[in-house]
Image (cartoon, rainbow, N blue to C red):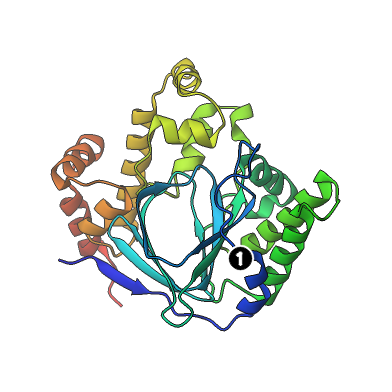
Amino acid sequence: MSDAVVIVPSKTADVGRLLKLARQDTRIAVEGESHPPVISAFVTRVRETLNRLVMPTAGLVVLLEGTKDIVSGTEHRIYRSGDAFILNANEHVDVVNEPDHKSGFYRALFVRFDRALIKEAARLWPQFVNQELRLREPLLTDDLCSALLHAAEALSYQTRVSRRVAEHRLLEVLLILAEQGAISLTPKYVDGSVVEAVRLLVRHRLHFPWTTAAVSSEFSMSEATLRRRLSAEGHSLEHLLLDERMKAAFTILNDRDASVAEALAATGYQSRSHFSKHFQQRFGATPSEVRLHRSQTRLPD
């Protein structure tokens, strides 16, 4: 069965307001800086193919000219001018950037949200912490356009504003995205139980191929420190991932009208036999048996 291709519909948005932020390519770190700009412009006149791209921090991608193809697992999404989406931290994606046939340019913006900024947003607006993501179209609203322009102005070398003011402008962008249900905020849970921190982190992205490196990066700690702190609480990352995936799989099969294949995909398993083995060891029944039991006990309409 071929992978599903989702053509994301372009929405009417004032892209022209943002084009001035993408006059030239600024994705390369400014000389003398250890980090790329908070708002980067991706500009090219040739087709770009980026395999297994991984962003260290979450960010907002805004398409201004051309198209962007994103492949993540079995999902293939196509974005066009006026579209915007969130690229999650440590998510592995294959990307193709295609210039516009008329102008000859591909232009896009990437707004980087570092970990400290997301923690601050979570502190200010706890109602958006670990919220279930909702797809609302269009993501690129007039409010978001204005917030991006204000943030870019504050971050400009020509504008002399305090670091605090610049941070508030970026927080406004995060708030708008959180209100739209496009991003989930994560506070600094690692001040307490690391086990609970990991559970909260992975619970809504169980399909993601979590590694020690990816999790430790989310909490701004070394891999060795993560392993040590988990061990001190009597756990390992492998154990926590298995526990969360099995609980989610049982919920999907027992409480929802979902197939075993859907439970497999939602919990990140590539092998059906491994999935079934772990499931039966945990619950004493196979995934198919649990699903069959649910269908037999379902009340008639």
Residue found 71% across the figure and 52% down from its top? 125
Q: Nearer the viewer, residue 172 or 129?
A: 172
What residue is shown with label 1? Answer: 22
* Residue at the (61%, 36%) spot, across then down: 34
The picture places residue 90, in percent across and down from the top left corner, at 45, 44
The percent coordinates of residue 195 (x first, y second) are 49, 29
Q: Quadrant of residue 299?
A: bottom left
Q: At which x and y percent is residue 134? A: 52, 66
| Res 257 → quadrant | bottom left
Left or right: where 84 falls relative to 124? left
Q: What is the quadrant of the N terminus in the image? A: bottom left
Position of residue 49 relative to residue 283, above or below, is: below
Is 7 positioned to the left or the right of 120 in the image? Answer: left
Which residue type does callout 1 highlight?
A: Ala
Q: Indicate whether 184 appears above or below 222.
A: below
Q: Is residue 242 above or below residue 148?
A: above
Apparent side of residue 287 relative to residue 90 in the rendered image (left or right) = left
